[in-house]
Image (cartoon, rainbow, N blue to C red):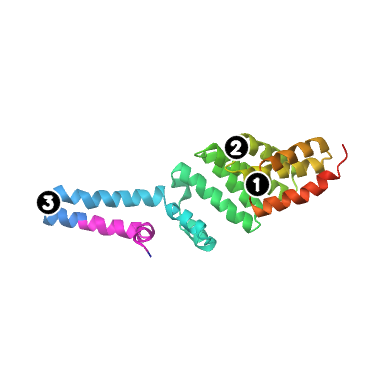
Amino acid sequence: MNLRKVIVFYRIPIAVVLIALGFLIGFKVTWWIAWIPLLCAILMVVAYFLVGPMTLIQGYMEAGDMEGAQKLLGMVKYPSLLYKPIRSSYYMLQSNFSTLGDDLDKAEEQLRKSIDMGMPEKEYEGTAYLQLGAISMKKGNSKDAYAHLRKAVQLGLPDKDNLATAYLQLSSICVQRRDFRNAKIYFGKAKSCKATNAQVVEQIKEMSKYIARIPG
C-alpha cells in the first residue's frame, strides 16, 4: 500500500495522532510550532468528509479493479457531505454499479442525483443522460429513452463512440415507431461519427443491414 492510499484510508486515525502531537508540542515546547500538526489534522478531517476516498477511484477503474472501486465507494459514510462535484461523480459511479447489478430503478435514482448536483462539464451531463436513456430502454420506456438520448446529443458527449451509440439508439427507437425517415437520419449520423469501439462498430454493421431493407 503506497503512502497516498495510507493517508486516504487512515485520515481520521492520522488526524487523532496529529492532534495529540500538536498538544504535546504545545505544552512541552511551544504553541508557535504546535499549530502545524493541529492544522494538518483539521485538513485531514475536512478531506475525510468533503473528498472521501474518491481521489483513488480513477486508478482502480483504469486498472479494471471494479470490486476495489466498489469497496472504495462503500467507504463513503456521509455522501451528502461530499463536495458537490465529487458528490456528483459518486452518484454516477454508484449508478454504474447499480446498472451492472440490474437494479435499474436505483441506477436511475442515483443518476438523477448526480445530475442535480451539477456536472463540472456539459459533456459529463450528456453522458449521464445517455445512461438514463439506456436505462429507460432496458425498462421498455421508449418515450423517456428518446427524450434522454436527444438531451444527451444536445448537451454533447465526450467522444465519437458515445455519440454514435446515442444516434444508434435513437435510430432504433425510430424504427420501433416506424418513423423510418428519422431512423435513417439518425443512422447516417451514427455512421458519420466513425466510431472505433469494436462493439459500436459491430452494432453499426448490424443496423446497416436492417436500414438497407427499409423502403424509400
The quarter of the rendered structure image containing the C terminus is top right
**Left or right of 197 in this view: 42:** left
Dot 3 corresponds to which residue?
30
The quarter of the rendered structure image containing the N terminus is bottom left
Identify which residue is drawn at 59% across, 46% down. Answer: 111
**Left or right of 212 in this view: 82:** left
Q: Nearer the viewer, mark 1 or mark 2?
A: 1
Instruction: Determine which of the numbered discs, if any, sits on residue 156 in the image.
Output: 2
Above/below status of 24 relative to 126: below
Report the residue that reaches farthest toward the right.
215
Dot 1 corresponds to which residue?
195
Q: Is residue 139 magenta?
A: no
The one of 42 and 170 positioned closer to us in this rendering = 170
Identify which residue is drawn at 18% across, 51% down. Answer: 34
Q: Earlier in the sequence, mark 3 or mark 2?
A: 3
Mark 2 lies on a secondary structure that is loop
Check if mark 3's residue and mark 2's residue have beta carbons within 8 Å.
no
Mark 1 lies on a secondary structure that is loop
Report the residue that reaches farthest toward the left.
29
Give the overall secondary structure of the magenta segment: helix
Q: Is residue 4 magenta?
A: yes
Q: Which stretch appears magenta?
A: 2-21
At label 1, the amino acid type is Ala
Q: Position of residue 53 (x, y in %)?
A: 43, 55
Identify which residue is drawn at 68% across, 54% down. Answer: 199
The one of 80 and 104 positioned closer to us in this rendering = 104
**Left or right of 174 in this view: 60:** left
Q: How far separated are the C-alphas under marks 3 and 2?
A: 57 Å
**Left or right of 85 in this view: 40:** left
At label 3, the amino acid type is Thr
Q: Label 3 crowding class (10 Å Cα cut-off): few <14, some 14-19, many 20+?
A: few
Q: Earlier in the sequence, mark 1 or mark 2?
A: 2
